[in-house]
Image (tube, grey):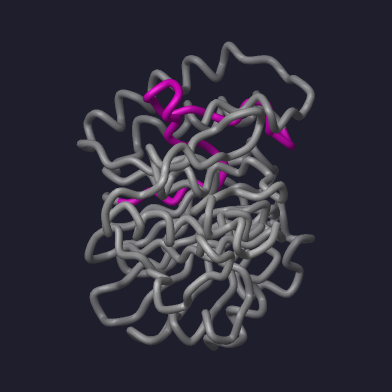
């Protein structure tokens, strides 16, 4: 589409969209879903709404969210975007991780840990380490491993993965084994969680933050925590078992998934929802992988 047509139409989502939901998370009410892809519902009415669209554009893994004129303005890039004083959303989601969200977890000593990774770029790496050293890159599972080694090498950080998905990062510096929780830093726990993949892991921080990878997420459709039953590569039965084994032990307020939306709720509410999710998941049966069936 020619530049003057783009200006006339304002913000738009082009045909490269893969319906990953990232833009809809960042610009709710402005970007929605229609016909199996994201669409612009309306143009921004003020600076705050424009900022949400710029965030969506800079996060979109296919660069499908286009501003008037068609070119992204680097000065409007908000990432890393603070969710609170401890966690930032990295943005710049990568097509090589199926457009997964990634996070920067800040620690009291001034260091940070990166949970999964954005697209690889030396400039992005510099931006993420600007506030202090990044000591660890924590991979939640194989699907999100694409840029782990490059970021870890750039940061001089340790790369973590579970043995069940080790073939996706065979040069990892730290390999988690079995299903027992492992303390990997002060206040940070790795909890193996087989199900979505054999080597899926939750990372829990400060009994407040749960980085769930693709094990479970917040669904806007159901207004609850859900599993992506239609995109379970290893075993829905093992995922149910992981939920049952850990539901009574998990304490957190922030649910921070790789795919699907984020949510903050009181810890007791999260715990109740997880117990109900475990019961629901036990009733599920294996089904063919179908990306279109996920209830975002």
- In the picture provided, is 181 more to the left or to the right than 209? right
Residue 9 image offset from top left, x and y in percent: 53, 50
Query: Is 193 above or below relative to 155?
Result: above
Query: Is 292 above or below relative to 279?
Result: below
Which residue is located at x 61 percent, y 47 percent? 200
- In the picture provided, is 274 more to the left or to the right than 193? left
Q: Quadrant of residue 214?
A: top right
11 falls in the magenta region: no
What segment carries the magenta color? 209-234
Residue 81 image offset from top left, x and y in percent: 35, 65
Q: Quadrant of residue 160?
A: bottom right
Query: Is 4 above or below relative to 246?
Result: below
232 falls in the magenta region: yes
Which residue is located at x 52 percent, y 55 percent? 101
Decide which of 158, 93 is in the foreground and name it: 93
Decide which of 131, 211 is in the foreground and name it: 131
Which residue of the protein is positioned furthest toward the top in this rendering?
Answer: 283
Residue 50 image offset from top left, x and y in percent: 35, 57
Which residue is located at x 72 percent, y 54 percent? 165
- In the picture provided, is 86 more to the left or to the right than 156? left
Which residue is located at x 42 percent, y 29 percent? 220
């Amino acid at each position: 589409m020619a530049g003057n047509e783009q200006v006339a139409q304002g913000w738009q989502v082009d045909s490269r969209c893969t319906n990953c939901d990232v833009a809809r998370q960042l610009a709710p009410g402005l970007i929605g879903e229609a016909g199996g892809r994201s669409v612009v519902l309306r143009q921004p009415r003020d600076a705050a709404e424009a900022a949400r669209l710029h965030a969506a554009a800079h996060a979109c893994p296919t660069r499908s969210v286009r501003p008037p004129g068609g070119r992204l303005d680097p000065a409007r890039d908000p990432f890393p975007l603070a969710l609170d004083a401890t966690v930032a959303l990295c943005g710049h989601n990568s097509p090589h991780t199926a457009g997964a969200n990634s996070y920067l977890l800040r620690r009291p000593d001034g260091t940070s840990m990166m949970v999964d990774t954005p697209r690889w770029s030396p400039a992005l790496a510099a931006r993420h380490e600007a506030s202090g050293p990044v000591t660890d890159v924590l991979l939640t599972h194989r699907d999100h491993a694409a840029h782990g080694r490059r970021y870890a090498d750039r940061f001089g950080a340790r790369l973590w993965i579970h043995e069940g998905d080790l073939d996706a990062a065979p040069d990892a510096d730290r390999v988690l084994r079995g299903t027992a929780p492992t303390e990997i830093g002060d206040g940070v726990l790795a909890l193996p969680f087989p199900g979505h993949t054999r080597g899926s892991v939750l990372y829990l921080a400060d009994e407040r933050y749960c980085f769930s990878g693709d094990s479970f997420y917040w669904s806007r459709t159901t207004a609850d925590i859900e599993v992506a039953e239609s995109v379970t590569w290893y075993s829905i039965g093992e995922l149910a078992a992981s939920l049952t084994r850990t539901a009574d032990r998990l304490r957190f307020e922030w649910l921070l998934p790789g795919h699907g939306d984020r949510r903050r709720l009181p810890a007791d509410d999260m715990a109740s929802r997880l117990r109900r999710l475990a019961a629901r998941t036990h009733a599920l049966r294996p089904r063919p992988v179908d990306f279109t069936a996920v209830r975002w």
